[in-house]
Image (tube, grey):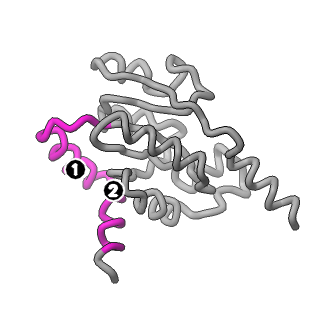
Amino acid sequence: MSHKIDIIKRKILADHELDRWLAQVRFKNRKIVFTNGCFDVLHRGHVDYLTRASELGDLLVVGLNTDESVRKLKGPSRPYLDEETRAFILASLGFTSAIVLFGEETPLALIQKVRPDVLVKGSDYKPAEIVGYDLVTSWGGQVLTIDLTPGFSSTQILGKISDKR
């Protein structure tokens, strides 16, 4: 296996690895940004969003829905890409620092564990409606939204693919 693939895979953290990683970054007093999602069909809108999220701090942690949780949220035909593939693609982006899978309905427990300085979602949410808002603001963190890139959505892309069949 190549050295670069190893580097990518090291960004995908299991629960016990996350604890050790968080201890190291907290010791270094790094500013942690957290976001989450399914990222089933990665597209330019996702990359724009994640890039801008990464600019809000030193490290970007992405909570990634497991396959099972994606099915619960999006229906039985989803995800199109399995969790291992989605995690690998997100980890290959130079500006992501850690990818952590979560299977719960919401990322609340993961947010509590990560204790980000900044919690980010797309502007289709109001900050106070974002899961984890109360937690993050209770420890002095920020909850921000990022404008979505017009013309790019998974639903749109999947519709185009479906129309071409």
Residue 25 point in image, percent of width and height: 19, 43
- Which residue lies under the disc numbered 1? 21
Residue 18 drawn above or below residue 162: above
Relative to 92, 147 lies left or right: right
Which quarter shows the C terminus? Answer: bottom right
Quarter-of-image position of residue 119? top left
Residue 84 point in image, percent of width and height: 48, 65
Residue 50, magenta (yes or no): no
Relative to 105, 27 lies left or right: left
Residue 112 point in image, percent of width and height: 34, 32
Q: Give neighbour class at mark 1: few <14, some 14-19, many 20+ (Cα, 10 Å).
A: some
Look at the image and give the residue range highlighted in magenta. 4-32
Q: Is residue 113 visible?
A: no
Amino acid type of the residue that numbered disc 1 sits on in the rendered structure? Trp
Residue 42 drawn above or below residue 62: below
Residue found 33% across the figure and 81% down from its top: 2
Q: Nearer the viewer, residue 90 or 83?
A: 90
Residue 9 point in image, percent of width and height: 35, 66
Q: Is residue 9 visible?
A: yes
Relative to 54, 125 lies left or right: right
Q: Nearer the viewer, residue 29 or 152?
A: 152
Residue 6, magenta (yes or no): yes
Residue found 35% across the figure and 36% down from its top: 33
Q: Main secondary structure of the magenta part?
A: helix
Q: Nearer the viewer, residue 111 or 145?
A: 145
Amino acid type of the residue that numbered disc 2 sits on in the rendered structure? Ala
SS assignment at label 1: helix
SS assignment at label 2: loop
Give the label on residue 14, or none.
2
